[in-house]
Amino acid sequence: METALIVEDDPDQAEMAAAFLRLRQIEPRMAFDGRSGVDCVRIHRPDFVLLDLMLPDIDGFEVCRQIRSAPETMSLPIIMVTALHGDSHRRLGFRVGANSYLTKPYGPSDLYQAIDQALSWQGKADRERIRGEIQIELDSAPKFLRQVNDFLVGLYRATPLTIEQVQHLQQAVLEIGQNAIEWGNRMQVDLPVEISYRVFEDRVEICIRDQGSGFDQAMLPHAACRDNPLAHLEVRQRMGLREGGFGLLIARGMLDELRHNEAGNEVTLTKRFPPDAVPDHCAGQEA
């Protein structure tokens, strides 16, 4: 029988959720504050978590962050339950996203749909051999980018990446993330930058997406290029831009692969594990 952990400080709400789960033949467990929820996840390893946002000690986003920070629970499906509507819950600056969201009040069909969505994500991850995936959303402000980058470094250290590789990935995320804030979202703080962190058997991938209309990589005269890395400086001066423009060039030199989507508003950064840390069946495979 599948098991679920309900993290909810309201006993009536928790019991209602438990009753809905039993109707679907899912065995519920309960935790009434955030820290107890984190402990229960580590001890009991449920099949998924139903996580309230507003808790008496630490909020649901922090619980989600702690669950996602541990390699053994990184891929656990999480359904966030909130009484907040619209974008008001985003005012925390940045959040580690759950796999699905449920708004109070909700009925059994709403809950079952959220469960199916969360478990569908897990099935997709299994098919694509993703060992873990974390969705992060942050407001377009450099301070939140630095906080997210520090959070990601803790995740990199749980992989076979070397110290040097971790440093390279850290710098590349900072460069590309700053581009997303400055050029994609035009420094509009309320526009989110979406970051996906994925761990495979042989590599780490970071996908950074902004809300801009994208760009043509061939039409960036203000950015450094490999053939003539200094030619852009005069262009930047004419355009009245700050010194810089080396972000993409620096990031490419620190990564095994850097690719854009067709629109130009999403960048995927790839760093491969050292050969001796890659399983034999992955050797020679294409990403």
Image (cartoon, grey):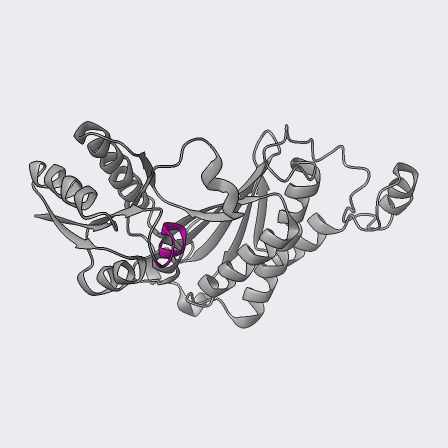
Measuring 57% from the left and 59% from the top, which residue is drawn there?
169
User: Where residue 16 sits in the image (x, y, percent)?
Assistant: 15, 39
Residue drawn at x 59%, y 66% is: 167
Asked whether 61 or 185 is in front, the reply is 61
Q: Is residue 110 visible?
A: yes
Q: Is residue 59 above or below residue 220?
A: below
Q: What residue is shown at x 46% (from left), y 55% (from top)?
A: 204
Asked if residue 193 is among those painted magenta in the image, a careful observer would answer no
Does residue 95 lie above or below 88 as drawn? Answer: below
Q: Position of residue 166 (x, y in %)?
A: 54, 65
Numbered range of the magenta stretch: 57-63
Residue 248 position, x and y percent, is 69, 48
Query: In the image, is residue 58 part of the stretch drawn in magenta?
Result: yes
Q: Position of residue 95 (x, y in %)?
A: 46, 48
Residue 287, visible in the rendered structure: no
Specify whether 218 is left or right of 243.
left
Q: Write down the quadrant of residue 127 in the picture.
A: top left
Q: Is residue 160 left or right of residue 178?
A: left
- Residue 112: which quarter of the image? top left
Of residue 129 and residue 48, the one placed in the foreground of this image is 48
